[in-house]
Amino acid sequence: MKQNGKARALIKFAVSAAVALGGLFLLQRLLVPKYVDGIVEGAFIAEYYGEKKDFDVIFVGDCEVYENFSPIVLWQEYGINSYIRGSAEQYIWQSYYVLEDTLRYETPKAAIFNIQSLQFDKSQNEAYNRMTLEGMRWSPSKVNAILASMKPEEQFLDYVFPILRYHSRWSELTASDIRYMFDTKRVSHNGYYMRVDVRPAENVPTGRILGDYSFGENAWKYLDMMRELCEEKGVKLILIKAPSLYPYWYPEWEEQVEEYAQKYGLPYINFLELTEETGIDYSTDTYDAGLHMNLSGAEKLARYMGRFLREEIGLLDRRGETELQEIWKSKIEAYEAEREAQYVKYGMKEENGQ
Amino acid sequence: MKKLTALLMAASLLILAGCGNDEKVMDGSGQNSEAGASGSAGSAGTVQGGKGYVFTYKGTTIQVDADAAPIVEALGEPASYYEAASCAFEGLDKIYSYSGFELNTYPSGDKDLVSAVVFRDDSVSTAEGVCIGDTLEKVKQVYGDDCTEEDGMLVYEKDGMKLCFILKEDVAAIEYRSTVLE
């Protein structure tokens, strides 16, 4: 009798605990941001895990990669299979760990890193941290990325149990929070964020005078780590500076990057100096006055990059591979469908295609 | 057993109710609203004086974290204007350029607040009389020694804002900065 009572109590406890934990799990799923409409950038990092991981090229970096290069053009015109692992204001230590995370699954032939984030020596904003870190699958790379990124007021446990951070979002929930509790939808094209609208670059301010133009020790440390990781894995590291006109890219910063690239024999492409070669026209190829490229600009940059990757890095055309052809067929359809929808949305084309 | 279960439930409730008074709120977009971010904003403009160091231009007093709208209206047509969307988030950082200085703003709720005033040449000076080209000695004479050095700048903090003097040999630039975004 006594034993039966104990067993019943144990079962009761186990059921209660399971109900409580299940409830917490459901609440967490409900409350975390879904990034499926409006601000979608927080979904980019996680989307990679659903891919067949056989990429020739992985881009890492901030908005200057995910808004400025079209992987679809790289495939369609050069047969280069590429993916962009970038997110908003992705700091260099995050790009390092995202690349390390990527190399757990595959070994691309080249990694392209946009060096804009060298200007930051520590994380600036928790919300940006979360957009990158929450999308990473749990691994030592994610743990280290969190530890490297946390601002003093942040807690590691909040990343393990996001409900601790988002518990007060209940008043802002929308239908999407319920619709996408356990599922999500694709919001990027191999990590590329598409915008077709046009806003010419005018009155772009010059940079403020800085007291010190040197990149910080921490930023350099992670660039060294990225270079060493690529060397160890046999991945060709390519440094780039996207042609974004703002935030201002200082000549003093350019000198430091050029010196580093030369010292270690790394290719470095500063697209700000290649407007003639790429054909970038700041009156038609940007949607936000020079900060980011629109689709036209991103396709032009992809064409230049494709030529470079083929001629200088020796990447082969894989358009003959049946499996890849199939994969890209549906990606191209999604890309073209979104392009047409955006032309209508931004009044650049009427719904009937005129 | 019942106590343990109750404890677990209480913990859940605690999580839902909030874990502290000094919490920051992560809004629907994932963006932080730092506690005090909007609270530090005054209703600036020509009528306002005083929190931290302020810059006065043709009778218009400008203080950081103040509502930019009345200031911009009082200053009149800028020589140029640029707006920059932040990566991912809604709202625009705006830069208004006037003769000798530029005014930077950041979005906060439905307002734009002043994030910085940046001197561009020596045609303008601080309310205390320091301008670009002045010496370090003059800066110290006017503002004293109670300052810090950060990244090649002399920084005077007052009421949650910073007055920064970027020094090369002499004063190369002067900025009034908000600390809200740091």
Image: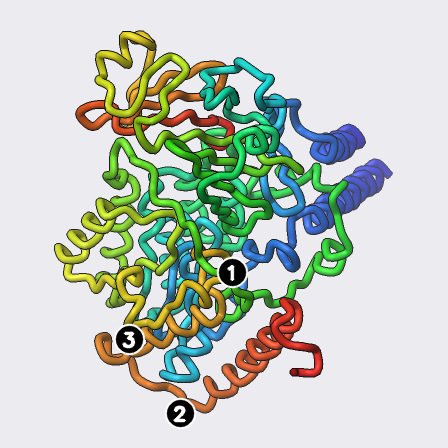
Q: CA distance from mark 1 to mark 3?
A: 30 Å
Q: Earlier in the sequence, mark 2 or mark 3?
A: 3
Q: Residues within 10 Å of mark 3 (few under 14, many from 20)?
A: many
Q: Earlier in the sequence, mark 1 or mark 3?
A: 1
Q: Nearer the viewer, mark 1 or mark 3?
A: 1
Mark 1 residue type: Arg
Residue type beneath disc 3:
Leu
Chain containing mark 1: A
The residue identified by callout 2 is: A320
> How far across and how far down the image is residue B154, in percent?
30, 20
Q: Looking at the picture, how far across and down is residue A84, in whole percent?
A: 43, 65
Which label is found at residue A309? 3
From this view, report whether residue A59 is shown above or below residue A19.
below
Mark 1 vs mark 3: tell me if same chain. yes
**Residue at the image point whose x is 26% and y is 41% from the top:** A215
Q: Residues within 10 Å of mark 1 (few under 14, many from 20)?
A: some
